[in-house]
Amino acid sequence: MESQIQCIAVLANIDQRLDELLEDYGDLPDQINKIEFKVNEKKVLVEETQAILDEIKKFVKQAKVTLVDLKEKEERLAEQQFKVRNNKEFDAITNEIEHLKSEHEKLSDRLRTEGVKQENLMNILEGQMKDMEDVQKELDDKYDEAKKLSGDQNEELTYLQNKRLEVIDMIKTTFVKDYERIRSMHRDAAVIIKKNSCSGCFSAIPAQIIVEVRNNPNHTYYCENCGRLLLPDDILVGEIF
């Protein structure tokens, strides 16, 4: 599997070519970029909510098992009360039963609370997914508009747009979000370090950062001056086309 930086470099290369194809389309490329950014924002929200829901579902499943265990222990102890030999044993069992009842009540209360939270989150998730689908539909419409304008370039444009989606799926959502945010300010969101400098704004890059960029292909580093995402100078992306 390609590294995250390799995939980002491929994405940047695709976007550069898409920009060239779409440069005669007025502000359509900017509209597409902004909507792509919105899609990824919506996607992050959906993933975050889904992650919380998954944790709640995990807790609910385990809590129900625990409640059954507590009840069974309580019933077994209740039966033992009739077989005790003295008051000391009776009191000990009674205390243990009370403790089990207390734990059962606490867990039941939390289970009810988490159940309400789960229901609320499911409603929120439903709304978030609807928002994401609406924005994705808006993006698809813009893609269709671009295809109609592309004329003889339609085949390459379609290929690149599909390839872009494939590459994005290989990149962490948070990295894509950062990339799209930077791209809303700089068309060349990811740039190669050349002659120890950012090739976007030409500011010097500290030697330590250059070393880290080269040696940590699954981590992202940014130019301290312009905020662009930095790529190592030995990265290759030509083979994707």
Image: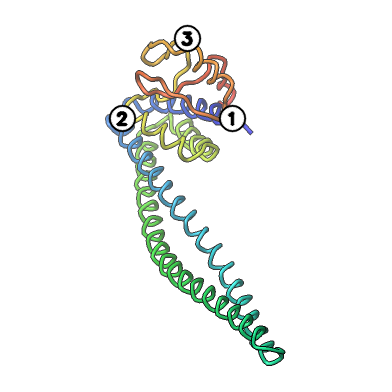
Q: Quadrant of the C terminus?
A: top right
Q: Which residue is mark 3?
A: 196
Give the mark nearer the N terminus: 1 vs 3: 1
Local secondary structure at mark 1: loop
Mark 1–mark 3 Cα distance, whole angstroms, equals 22 Å
Figure check: 172 above or below 115: above
Local secondary structure at mark 3: loop
The image shows residue 193 at horizontal and vertical percentages of: 47, 14
The image shows residue 106 at horizontal and vertical percentages of: 49, 72
Give the mark nearer the N terminus: 2 vs 1: 1
Q: Residues within 10 Å of mark 1 (few under 14, many from 20)?
A: some
- Give the residue displayed 43% in from the left and 52% down from the top: 46
Whether tag 2 and tag 3 are in contact, CB under 8 A, the answer is no
Q: Residues within 10 Å of mark 3 (few under 14, many from 20)?
A: some
The image shows residue 4 at horizontal and vertical percentages of: 55, 31
Three-letter amino acid code at the position of disc 2 = Tyr
Q: Residues within 10 Å of mark 2 (few under 14, many from 20)?
A: some
Local secondary structure at mark 2: loop
- Give the residue displayed 37% in from the left and 23% down from the top: 227
Residue 123: which quarter of the image? bottom left
Q: Which residue is mark 1?
A: 3
Mark 2–mark 1 Cα distance, whole angstroms, equals 33 Å
Figure check: 194 above or below 14: above
The residue lying toward the viewer, choosing from 28 and 1, is: 1
**Image depth: mark 2 or mark 3 in front:** 3
Whether tag 2 and tag 1 are in contact, CB under 8 A, the answer is no
- Give the residue displayed 48% in from the left and 7% down from the top: 195
Q: Which residue is mark 2?
A: 25
**Image depth: mark 2 or mark 1 in front:** 1
Three-letter amino acid code at the position of disc 3 = Asn
